Amino acid sequence: MKSTQDAPVWLVTGCSSGFGRSIAEHLLEEGFRVVVTARKTEQVSDLGARDNASPCRWMSPTTPVS
């Protein structure tokens, strides 16, 4: 991939554990931009804090969006 800005954005749900988390981790390692969801955002906050990770944004489906 040329740069993070050129990378497609993936939306992955259920990222607190299991299959969803594994997918999100793999996509970040491959350089994609990732938006993840989880009921408890503290369970996914570490995904964006990893060294050499692509940009990762997280959101909770219980948080109202304005």
Image (tube, rainbow, N blue to C red):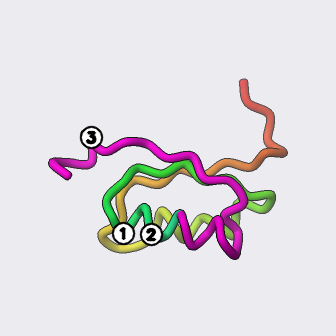
Q: CA distance from mark 2 to mark 3?
A: 18 Å
- Pick whichever of labels 3 and 1 is earlier in the sequence: 3
Relative to 59, is 47 above or below? below
Q: Are marks 1 and 2 in contact (CB under 8 Å)?
A: yes
Q: CA distance from mark 3 to mark 1?
A: 15 Å
Q: Provide the residue designation for mark 2.
A: 26
Dot 1 amino acid type: Glu
Q: Are marks 3 and 1 in contact (CB under 8 Å)?
A: no
Dot 2 amino acid type: His
Residue at x 53%, y 63% (from the top left corner): 24
Q: Is residue 51 magenta?
A: no
Question: Which one is in front in this view, the residue at disc 2 or the one at disc 3?
Answer: 2
Secondary structure category for the residue under label 2: helix
- Residue 56: x, y in percent? 47, 54
Q: CA distance from mark 1 to mark 2?
A: 5 Å
Q: Provide the residue designation for mark 3.
A: 5
Residue at x 37%, y 53% (from the top left corner): 32
Crowd around label 1: few <14 · some 14–19 · many ≥20 (10 Å): some
Q: Quadrant of the C terminus?
A: top right
- Residue 36: x, y in percent? 60, 53
Dot 3 amino acid type: Gln
Residue 43 falls in image quadrant = bottom right
Q: What range of the chain is rendered magenta? A: 1-23
Relative to 31, is 18 above or below? below
On residue 29, which mark appears?
Answer: 1
Tell me: 28 left or right of 37. left
